[in-house]
Amino acid sequence: MAPYNSWDAKSLQNYLTTKGQQAKKGTEQNTKSLAEQVKVYWTETEDSANQAYGSVKDWIFDSYVFAPSAFNLLLTCADGPTPSSRRLPTSTASLFPSLASVTAS
């Protein structure tokens, strides 16, 4: 169930306004019609959130690859052996394949 289905007409209109849209003429007080209009822009919000999550996930993995001290801290906290900096893998995901498969889905 989408959260906007429980919003009142004013909240739905406000959401449309924040998206740069106006309620269709004659539907300004009809919450069902307004909810249908919000639904169009809500899916874009969901897609944006998924893209942002992917970017953050990539940033986290990339930052561990390029920051050996953070990488060593991660291994220490996970009770793993801390390799010397000359033997660090090029990909953090190769060390934690189960974590990579969970975050990939």
Image (spheres, helix red, strand yellow):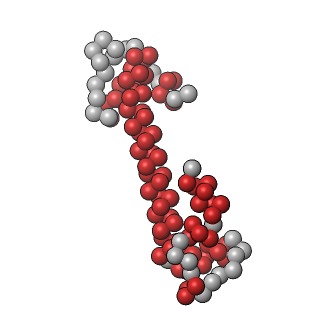
Q: Where does residue 89 sit, x and y in percent of width and height?
A: 56, 77
Residue 13 visible: yes
Quadrant in which the N terminus appears: top right
Relative to 33, is 17 above or below?
below
Residue occupying the point 34% across, 14% down: 27
Q: Nearer the viewer, residue 48 or 22?
A: 48
Q: Quadrant of residue 97?
A: bottom right
Q: As drawn, which residue projects farthest toward the top?
A: 26
Residue occupying the point 60% across, 57% down: 101
Q: Quadrant of residue 73?
A: bottom right
Q: Where does residue 22 sit, x and y in percent of width and height?
A: 28, 25
In screen coordinates, is 7 left or right of 76? Answer: left
Q: Quadrant of residue 45?
A: top left
Q: Where does residue 62 sit, x and y in percent of width and height?
A: 47, 68
In screen coordinates, is 100 left or right of 12? Answer: right
Residue occupying the point 39% across, 37% down: 44
Relative to 39, is 54 above or below?
below
Relative to 75, is 56 above or below?
above
Q: Where does residue 61 sit, x and y in percent of width and height?
A: 51, 66
Relative to 31, is 95 above or below?
below
Residue occupying the point 48% across, 52% down: 53
